[in-house]
Amino acid sequence: MAFAAIGGVVGAVIGGTTATGTAAAIAMAAVQGAAIGMALGSMVDVAVAGTPNTGSPEIQDLSFNTADEGLPIPEGCGCTKAYGNIFWVGESYST
């Protein structure tokens, strides 16, 4: 990921300094240079470090919503993965 950031900066500098015309054209050339530099830098990152192994989710990692009576309500602080219950609050109406 370091090469992608470096490539983006280098691409923006090269694109911005070699462009001519209005300020908008120079800014656009800098953005395009940054995009090309980041793409090339990302290729170098993959060649040096390899692709990250994110893996695939396992079947036991799946969780579904439930609708049961008497289940506790999960509480957490910060970024907590919690699967909720479906609640029905109110009278049950029948026709």
Image (cartoon, grey):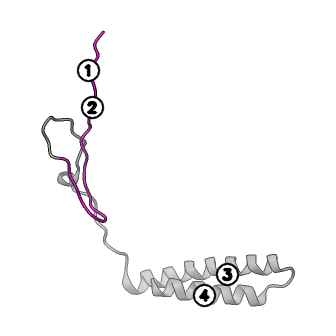
Assess whether mark 4 and mark 1 are in contact (beta carbons under 8 angstroms).
no
Mark 4 belongs to which amino acid?
A: Val
Q: Quadrant of residue 9?
A: bottom right
Name the element at disc 2: loop
| Residue span colored magenta | 73-95
Name the element at disc 3: helix
Name the element at disc 1: loop
Mark 3 belongs to which amino acid?
A: Gly
Image quadrant for the C terminus?
Answer: top left
Residue 65 is inside the magenta segment: no
- List the residue tagged with mark 2: 88
- List the residue tagged with mark 4: 9
Q: Residue furthest left?
A: 70
- List the residue tagged with mark 1: 92
Q: Earlier in the sequence, mark 2 or mark 4?
A: 4
Quick one: 60 or 94, which is closer to the camera?
94
Q: Residue furthest front?
A: 90
Name the element at disc 4: helix
Residue 91 is inside the magenta segment: yes
Q: Position of residue 58 (x, y in %)?
A: 21, 56
Magenta region's main secondary structure? loop
Q: CA distance from mark 1 to mark 4?
A: 62 Å
Disc number at residue 33?
Answer: 3
Categorize mark 4 by other alpha carbons within 10 Å: few (<14), some (14-19), many (20+).
Answer: some
Q: CA distance from mark 2 to mark 3?
A: 55 Å
Quick one: 52 or 77, which is closer to the camera?
77
Q: CA distance from mark 1 to mark 3?
A: 62 Å
